[in-house]
Amino acid sequence: KITVGEAAGSFAFFATDSGTYVVCFSNARATQAAREVSAKITVGEQGDGVELAKAEQLAPLEDRVKRLHTSMISVRDLQDQQREQDEERYRVTSQTRRWLLWFTVLEAFVLVAVSLWQILYLKSFFEVKRVV
């Protein structure tokens, strides 16, 4: 069992044994508000075999390549996360625009209906006054 006490961030876990693993997310400090959690789980060889060499065996250039490879993967994951967040924002914005369009149409209809009612009411009011 691995417990991470961070509120946000990037976490890595490399399994040494093959088998089935269970990932569980919880937030003990959460209130009634819903929380969104995103996770990217990668299955495969650890680091394309770069991690197999011991640190003292790596030349400085190889160590630099290893760090650049790790950084590149982190940047790619961050870009994927940003892309997903942008898609969610676009979906919410589109939905809000659709709702606003229907609200505007309904508002215009109500405005026209109230104006017609006022015209007819005032017309009938003045016609009654003329007769009396």
Image: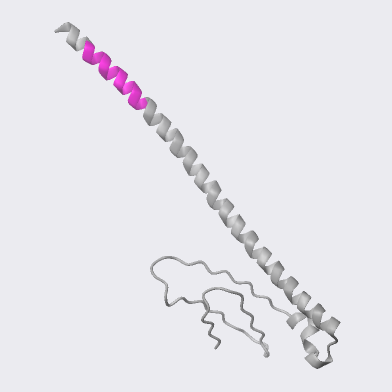
Q: How many marks?
A: 0
At 36% from the left edge and 26% from the top edge, which residue is drawn?
Answer: 113
On the rendered image, what quadrant is the N terminus found in?
A: bottom right
**Residue 29 as seen in the image, left or right of residue 39:** left
Depth check: 42 or 73 in front?
A: 73
On the rendered image, what quadrant is the C terminus found in?
A: top left
Residue 71: image location, x then y, percent? 73, 73
**Residue 117 as seen in the image, left or right of residue 86:** left
Outermost residue, top side: 131
At 73% from the left edge and 82% from the top edge, which residue is drawn?
Answer: 46
Colour scheme in the image?
one colour
Q: Is residue 45 visible?
A: no
Q: Is residue 63 visible?
A: yes
Residue 72: image location, x then y, percent? 75, 71
Outermost residue, front side: 60
**Vertically, is 114 above or below 18?**
above
**Vertically, is 20 above or below 68?**
below
Query: What segment is highlighted magenta in the picture?
Result: 113-126
Quadrant assignment, res 15: bottom right
Query: What secondary structure predominates along the stretch shown in magenta?
Result: helix
**Vertically, is 8 above or below 60?**
above
Quadrant assignment, res 130: top left
Say if the magenta span includes residue 114. yes
At 51% from the left edge and 66% from the top edge, which residue is drawn?
Answer: 36
At 65% from the left edge and 87% from the top edge, which residue is drawn?
Answer: 19
Residue 69: image location, x then y, percent? 77, 75
